[in-house]
Amino acid sequence: MLDEWDDVAWLREKAEDELAEKRAELAEYSQHDLEELVQELRVHQVELELQNEALCATQAELQVVRDDYARLYDEAPVGYFSIDPDGRIARVNRTGADLLGGQPAALEGQPLHHYVARDSQDALHLFVVRLLHLSLIHISEPTRPY
């Protein structure tokens, strides 16, 4: 929240600085031009307020969808594992963690091959390499949907 306030303060300061630079230009405007400018600014302010309301509504909708996704992922009756290009567990749901005998947070960052039978580790490695080569998985930093 502090970062948001810092961003708002920075934005206001930047706007005030730019306005100060243009203040001399305002002296050149007639009273009629200034009234038109004020009206235009009022209209723009209402537009921004409407856009803000729409953004807030969209953000609330996205939060609901994100929460639904998180619940579906975490409470799925099958184990879901997201692995990074090095074969480490980037994310795991509760069922997957139960299968491995751990907690999701404790398993993250652990090599998946540690939980696979030794004679199947080569097959797992080749499978991961093949997936990476075919670009069937998205390689990025894992993010929490909640």
Image (spheres, rainbow, N blue to C red):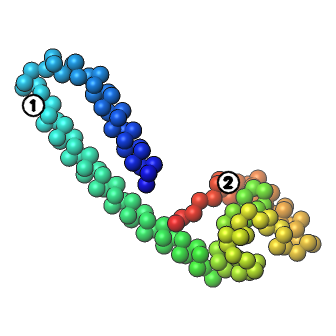
Q: Residue furthest left?
A: 32
Image point (37%, 44%), residue name: 8
Residue visible at 22% across and 40% down? 44
Q: Nearer the viewer, residue 2 or 37?
A: 2
How far apart are labels 1 and 2 at the CA level? 55 Å
- x and y, in percent, of residue 86 in the image: 78, 56
Residue 63 can be seen, yes or no: yes
In the rendered structure, which disc, 1 or 2, sits on the residue that comes first in sequence? Answer: 1
Quadrant housing residue 15: top left
Q: Answer yes or no: do the residues labelled 1 and 2 have beta carbons within 8 Å?
A: no
Please give left or right for residue 83 compared with residue 47 in the image. Answer: right
**Which quadrant of the figure contains the N terminus?**
bottom left
Identity of the amino acid at label 1?
Answer: Glu
Return the x and y of residue 38 as percentages of the image width and height.
14, 34
- Residue 79 can be seen in this image: no
Viewer-closest of 17 and 120: 17
In the image, what residue occupies the spot 74% across and 62% down? 109
What x and y, as percent, mark residue 26? 18, 22
Mark seen at residue 129 = none
**Where is residue 52 drawn, in percent x and y?**
30, 52
Numbered disc 2: secondary structure? loop
Residue 41 placement: quadrant: top left
Is 50 situated left or right of 83 in this image?
left
The numbered mark at residue 35 is: 1
Seen from the viewer's position, the closer of residues 130 and 89 is 89
Three-letter amino acid code of the residue under disc 2: Ile
- Horizontal side of 31 relative to 27 (left or right) equals left
What crowding class fits label 2: few (fewer than 14 Cα within 10 Å), some (14-19), or many (20 or more)?
few
Tag 2 residue: 139
Number of other residues with Cα within 10 Å of mark 1, as a class: few under 14, some 14 to 19, many 20 or more? few
Badge 1 marks a residue whose secondary structure is helix
